[in-house]
Image (spheres, grey):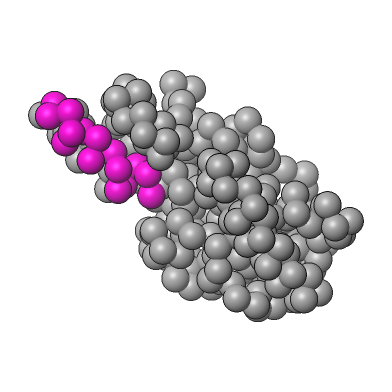
Amino acid sequence: MRIALFITCFNDTMFPGTGRAVVTVLERLGHTVEFPREQTCCGQMHFNTGYRPDAVPLVDRFSRTFAAYDAVVTPSASCAGMIRENHPVLAADLGDAALQRQVAEVMPKVHEFTEFLTDVLGVTDVGARFPHRVTYHPTCHSLRGLRLGNRPLRLLEAVKDIDLVDLPAADSCCGFGGTFAVKNAETSGAMLADKADGVLATGAEVLCAADNSCLMHIGGGLSRRDSPVRTMHLAEILAATEGTRDDRAW
């Protein structure tokens, strides 16, 4: 299987370690991962803020860049959702038959990281060890958009020596929502406060999720409370092998 990593512009700029973690896990499972350098943004920022025509060239570029691969894996539920749900919409709006065919061929090959592991590779135990108290926040795009269900939790439960604890009101939004946090700062801040209260109530050392954008938002709120709770993308926990012979920096 020819696998490509779609890192997303947000992760590439702010959290490149997440991409390295995805590659570490997949290589540990015996797969080679390629990184097409031609990749850019999926167009989510443009689409969500009403700049649909500006997103179309990005849709075209994405589908051409990843056309040759059997699977495209991304550590972002929101970007996976954008590609699968809205790339066809943009291609249809344009009325470009060639682009519609192009998108239709690539779209089914795009997988969020945890669903690729569980649904495509059929694994939950990826050989990770992480001896820490962890709680999981299901982001809105992973929970309501992609409907990942318990896939992330099944992967976390298989991590050796992890102390996985439930997050109170886990299915409530953290208040990020991209530009929502800027345009509706007071509402966003109130939602963030509730989410941070829930995280602190768990006594967890680490909060993890499938979207770094939400982790950045929650992490900011926790840091302003001088909380020692760390935020980590789920891929980084799955890449960890703390205390084993395979333990290494990634």
Please provide percent x and percent y for residue 104.
20, 40
Q: Residue at x 85, y 57 (%)?
A: 225
Q: Main secondary structure of the magenta part?
A: helix
Q: Residue at x 71, y 72 (%)?
A: 198
The region drawn magenta spans 81-96
Name above or below for residue 63 compared with residue 32. Answer: above
**Can I make out residue 239 in this image?**
no
Please provide percent x and percent y for residue 94.
17, 28
Residue 138 position by quadrant: bottom right
Please provide percent x and percent y for residue 133.
77, 71
Q: Is residue 18 left or right of residue 154?
A: right
Residue 218 within the magenta-colored segment of the rendering: no
Please provide percent x and percent y for residue 4.
43, 37
**Can I make out residue 120 in this image?**
yes
Q: Nearer the viewer, residue 84 or 214?
A: 214
* Location of the N terminus (image quadrant): top left
Name above or below for residue 230 compared with residue 63. Answer: below
